[in-house]
Image (cartoon, helix red, strand yellow):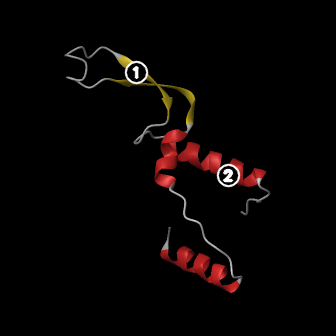
């Protein structure tokens, strides 16, 4: 989070006597279901020299290119369900 955003959040919290709860968003990334089929190739030595095998991912994985987009869409959807509205 950018420094000014963080400072603004703290100022609003103090002004309105609110409480802040910390959430571990780093681990939240790996719990999302993928919205399309993704396969990964096994690295050499992982399966006793057989490198032609692939695995189908069922959950998001660190380093996956679409991971941030999936997380952002899920967060936006959850916030909309709670009554928050997007600002442009």
Query: Dividing the picture into quarters, in which one does residue 74 lie?
Result: top right
Vertical placement of residue 5 versus 54, above or below: below
Q: Which residue is mark 2?
A: 76
Element under disc 1: strand
- Residue 45 lies, in percent from the top left, at 20, 23
**Is residue 66 visible in this depiction of the protein?**
no
- Proximity of marks 2 and 1: CB atoms separated by less than 8 Å: no
Q: Is residue 54 left or right of residue 80?
A: left
Q: Residues within 10 Å of mark 2 (few under 14, many from 20)?
A: some
Residue sitting at x 73%, y 63%: 87
- Residue 63 lies, in percent from the top left, at 40, 42
Viewer-closest of 20 and 26: 20
- Residue 69 lies, in percent from the top left, at 56, 45
Residue sitting at x 54%, y 59%: 23
Element under disc 2: helix
| Quadrant showing the C terminus | bottom right
Q: Which of the labelled discs sits on residue 55, or is there none?
A: 1
């Amino acid at each position: 989070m950018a420094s000014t955003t963080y400072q603004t959040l703290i100022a609003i919290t103090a002004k309105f006597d609110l409480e802040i709860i910390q959430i571990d968003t780093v681990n939240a990334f790996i719990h999302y279901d993928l919205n399309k089929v993704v396969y990964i190739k096994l690295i050499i030595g992982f399966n006793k020299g057989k490198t032609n095998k692939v695995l189908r991912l069922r959950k998001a994985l660190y380093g996956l290119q679409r991971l941030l987009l999936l997380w952002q869409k899920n967060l936006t959807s959850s916030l909309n369900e709670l009554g928050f509205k997007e600002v442009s």
